[in-house]
Image (cartoon, helix red, strand yellow):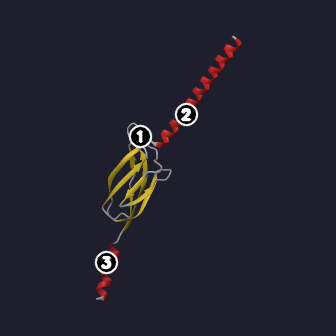
Amino acid sequence: MRTALLSLGLALVAGCCSSSMRGVVSSSETGGPIRGAVVQVQGRTTVTDPMGFYRVQDLECDDFYGVAISAPGYPLKRTTVTAPAGAEEVLANFKLDPVQGQQPQAMRSARQAQQAWAERQRLDLEDDEEEFEVFEAATGE
């Protein structure tokens, strides 16, 4: 009886498999990496680094993995990744399409900074014009 249980335990352990998935999440529009994208595989979640790199470890070995990727300015992407037979690590890169009418966060931030700078310049010019008009009225020139 003990031999049968021991054999069964060894068979179960030998049948267990652990895999990982890694890759890069990037913008389909710019080709640049997407920092802070959330990648979920088999209930395990990770966040991409500044270079868009992610790694999900300790996955159960499977032929197919359901993957969900989300990031600000991009719609949720759900896809299935096929694992090569016997692979201990799966390489899967993802390209996300920006939401129409929205720009990715980094682009929005840069554009907002440019717009704020332009608005300050416009206000500075208006102030200069007002000061000039006051000077003209006071001096008659």
Q: CA distance from mark 3 to mark 2?
A: 66 Å
- In the rendered image, residue 47, in percent from the top left (x then y), is placed at 45, 55
Q: CA distance from mark 3 to mark 1?
A: 49 Å
SS for tag 2? helix
Say above or below: 138 vs 76: above
Describe residue 108's horizontal placement relative to residue 132 as left or right: left
Q: Quadrant of the N terminus?
A: bottom left
Q: Are marks 3 and 1 in contact (CB under 8 Å)?
A: no
Looking at marks 3 and 2 on the same chain, the residue that comes earlier in the sequence is marked by 3
Say above or below: 135 vs 65: above
Q: Which residue is mark 2?
A: 116
**Amino acid type, mark 2:** Ala
Residue 2 location, quadrant: bottom left
Q: CA distance from mark 2 to mark 1?
A: 25 Å
Q: Residue at x 57, y 32 (%)?
A: 117
Q: Residues within 10 Å of mark 3 (few under 14, many from 20)?
A: few
Tag shown at residue 11? 3
Question: Please, which residue is most extreme toward the front here?
Answer: 138
Q: Which residue is mark 1?
A: 29
Numbered label tally: 3
Looking at marks 3 and 1 on the same chain, the residue that comes earlier in the sequence is marked by 3
SS for tag 3? helix
**Amino acid type, mark 1:** Glu
Residue 13 location, quadrant: bottom left
- In the rendered image, residue 120, in percent from the top left (x then y), is placed at 58, 30
Say above or below: 29 vs 126: below
**Amino acid type, mark 3:** Ala
Q: Residue at x 38, y 67 (%)?
A: 18
Q: Residues within 10 Å of mark 1 (few under 14, many from 20)?
A: few
Q: Which of pointers 2 and 1 indicates the residue nearer the eye?
A: 2
Q: Residues within 10 Å of mark 2 (few under 14, many from 20)?
A: few
